[in-house]
Amino acid sequence: MPGAQYLNIEKDVLRILMMVRGYVSEAKLAQQLGILKSTVNRVMKELMAKGFVIDFHPELGYRLADLDNLDQAYKYVNYLDTEIKFYINYVEVCDSTQDIALALAKKGAPEGIVILAEELRRGRGRMGRQWVATKGGLWLSIILRPRELKHVHLLSLATATALAEAINSILGVDARVKWPNDVLINEKKVAGILIEGSVEANIVQYVVVGIGVNVNNVLPQELRSTATTLKDTMGVEVPRIPLLLNMLKNLDNAYGLLKQNQTAEILRRWRKLSSTLNRYVKVITMNGEFEGMAENVEEDGALIIRTLDDNKVKIYTGDVIHLREQRP
Ligand code: BTN
């Protein structure tokens, strides 16, 4: 087998294994890559010799053994086939990954730098709230540099969609997005997104996309009526690296659309997963509270509410509460 081609097969095998949470059979790998089963076997030996830890099960096949060790995420991200070159900096514990990423971005750090932590001492949420981020969750901040301000709102919808799509494809659940960027499973919050950054003279200097996903962390009692974790949803621990990699891949794709002004496609994906549209909601904003039907999301990411007295209100920032009862 020629060397370069063999190396490509190694990469392809890794790319399949690192994106899924369980075992992949020898037959499936061979079929997907159009290679012999004996080649799969040889590739696995090569990968193990290079330090990848691979489990083998005679009936189920192969799986990467360290897909929940976040300190190993940096090595897998190198194999992601993305436009943005993601570079992962892992820290065991910090106050907030947002602060580290914001400071780096301010100093000129490039797009794609990710700060990933096992635990946050002072996790920050939207609207000045605290975000509980204990061990076992997925807590990260990504530096991006979209030029146009109008892209920032859409980036927030696009990130939520990228994350919900990743959760659904790995776990086969029905995660949904709540405007602007919460991810819900069975109406309980499983993930939140916080976008911070710097804008000068209407030009975005940088943004930091903060993503918090409740994966295997234990939620404090007071959050359990409104929030959930992936572990609680599945009944088993969920490895975090496939989730992280799928999400980065989806985000890269959506960011490409954003840069080409393909707004309609970003909104189409968001609408498909929306749990907010066509529902009666209460919206709490800095300018007051509104109740009404969530009619649409516009080109710029704003939510359109039809109030009970038939006014149309356009909302850019705020908290949405899905109301249980359907008002007239
Ligand atoms: C929300 O309020 O829904 C947004 C929560 C965002 C939390 C994440 S966890 C990683 C990053 N670092 C932080 O301090 N916050 C964000």
Image: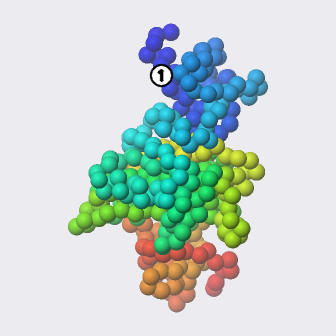
Looking at the figure, which quarter contains the C terminus? bottom right
Residue occupying image coordinates x 25% and y 65%: 200
Front-lying residue, 178 or 306: 178
Q: Choose top left, top right, bottom left or bottom right for residue 106.
A: bottom left
Q: Which residue does the numbered mark 1 point to in the structure image?
A: 8
Q: Is residue 285 left or right of residue 40?
A: left
Q: Position of residue 175 (x, y in %)?
A: 63, 57
- The answer to whether the residue bearing label 1 lies less than 8 angstroms from the nearest atom of ligand 1 is no
Q: Is residue 18 left or right of residue 174?
A: left
On screen, residue 178 above or below 21 = below
The color scheme shown is rainbow
Q: Position of residue 52 (x, y in %)?
A: 57, 27
Front-lying residue, 186 or 124: 124
Q: Position of residue 190 (x, y in %)?
A: 62, 60
Residue occupying image coordinates x 41% and y 55%: 100
Within 10 Å of the Cα at label 1, are there few (<14), some (14-19), or many (20+) other Cα atoms?
few
SS under mark 1: helix
Residue occupying image coordinates x 29% and y 64%: 199
Q: Is residue 192 left or right of residue 87?
A: right
The mark total stands at 1
On screen, residue 29 above or below 36 = below
Q: Is residue 35 visible?
A: no
